[in-house]
Image (cartoon, grey):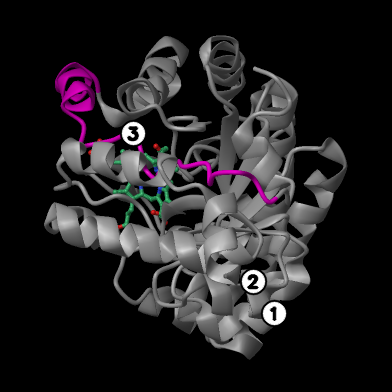
Amino acid sequence: MTADALFLRAARGEDTERAPIWVMRQAGRYLPEYRVLKRRHSFWELVRTPELAVEVSLQPVTRFGLDAAILFSDIMTPLPPMGVSIAFDPGPVFAEPVRDADAVDALRVPEPGELAPFVADALRALRASSPVPVIGFAGAPLTLAAYAVEGGGSKDFAAFRGFLRAQPEAAKALLEKLTEVTVRYLRMQVEAGAQAVQLFDSWAGLLDEPGYRRFGLPYARRVLDALAGTGAPRIYLAVGSGHLYGAIAELGADVVSVDWRRPLAAARRELRAACLQGNLDPAALLGPAGALEREAQAVLLSGLGGAHIFNLGHGILPQTDPDAVDRLVDVVRGFDRRAAIAEVAR
Ligand code: 1CP
């Protein structure tokens, strides 16, 4: 894979001739070939066996001809080495939520070599076999803390939001440990071959701006700063976070992922990021072909003001028909950004 691959050029801020495309959660339950493997292996088995993780990572790249491969893993992967036990059903379920200062004290901050060595092995193998650039990823400290305190997924993370108020010192101690682990984990991924990294702050949008500035931004910024010297572009994603764009602009991410609630052209002014990623509503893949094409074209047009990586605004839905992804890839590949800019200028 050469350094001038389309995805990496866009991620570094270049206004490319066409928008590269990859899809969040591109490997997973909507793909029949994934479901075949899932009948024989548990989720953790797929993640912890490098040959299987590589096979799953490449499934969507091979099928659709996408412009980047993301390692098949989960944002929870670095947490068991810290001393917590997590099952998947299908989302993460913690054996014991982290709810007080003693539980935070008990968490270990493992050395890089103890942190998921199977991830480093999988990334080396993926880098060697992938025809396109390889993306590594981690959960942002705030989002990992939300799961750890809540004990799993939730619509509103009420226990976590209560914890931030009732035990702010314990919350900060937890965020400190998660920040250190995330820095080590992402550095390890870049050393193993990840050519870009995405920091998933999926639940940052639950907080108001003062809350985000206190419990989200400083920790995410430390993670991104620690990766700045590696040369791997750093992508930041926070869903439903339009009210935080003023703060997110201060993060210094190379790429900001935008969801469908905000048009890319408006987000570009507010975020001042060199490159935007997004932002098709994943539900567009559930509708008729004509509507999908129109919505995708609107995203492509809205992205013309600078570097753009085409993606969904959030993860692909499990009920998506893979043929719809094929149609989407055709639309994005067929869209000549230079010609479109000339057209708009006329
Ligand atoms: O096979 C199955 O049934 C398990 C479903 C599944 C899959 C396919 C989970 C459980 N995780 C994954 C893979 C995964 N998770 C990837 C794969 C790489 C890719 O192809 O994109 C990635 C990047 C993630 C990251 C992840 N896990 C996030 C951040 C992204 C986002 O959607 O905001 C989050 C929040 C998780 C937690 C998680 N893991 C799994 C589920 C179902 C969830 C959501 C739980 C919840 O909040 O309810």
Q: Are marks 1 and 2 in contact (CB under 8 Å)?
A: yes
Q: Quadrant of the C terminus?
A: bottom right
Q: Are marks 3 and 2 in contact (CB under 8 Å)?
A: no
Under mark 1, the amino acid is Ala
Instruction: Kindly state the secondary structure of the residue where label 1 is placed.
Output: helix
Does mark 3 have its CB less than 8 Å from ligand 1? yes
Q: Earlier in the sequence, mark 3 or mark 2?
A: 3
Residue tagged by mark 2?
216
- Identify the main secondary structure in magenta: loop
Tell which residue pokes out farthest to the front in this image: 346
Under mark 3, the amino acid is Ala
Residue 239 point in image, percent of width and height: 46, 68
Alpha carbons under labels 3 and 1: distance apart: 31 Å
The segment highlighted magenta reads 15-41
Instruction: Kindly state the secondary structure of the residue where label 2 is placed.
Output: loop
Residue tagged by mark 1?
247
112 lies above or below 50 = below
Alpha carbons under labels 1 and 2: distance apart: 10 Å
Under mark 2, the amino acid is Gly
Residue 334 point in image, percent of width and height: 40, 42
Residue tagged by mark 3?
27
Residue 203 in sight: yes
Residue 154 point in image, percent of width and height: 31, 67
Task: Report the label total.
Answer: 3
The structure residue drawn at horizontal position 88% and vertical position 42%, both measured from the top left corner, is 229
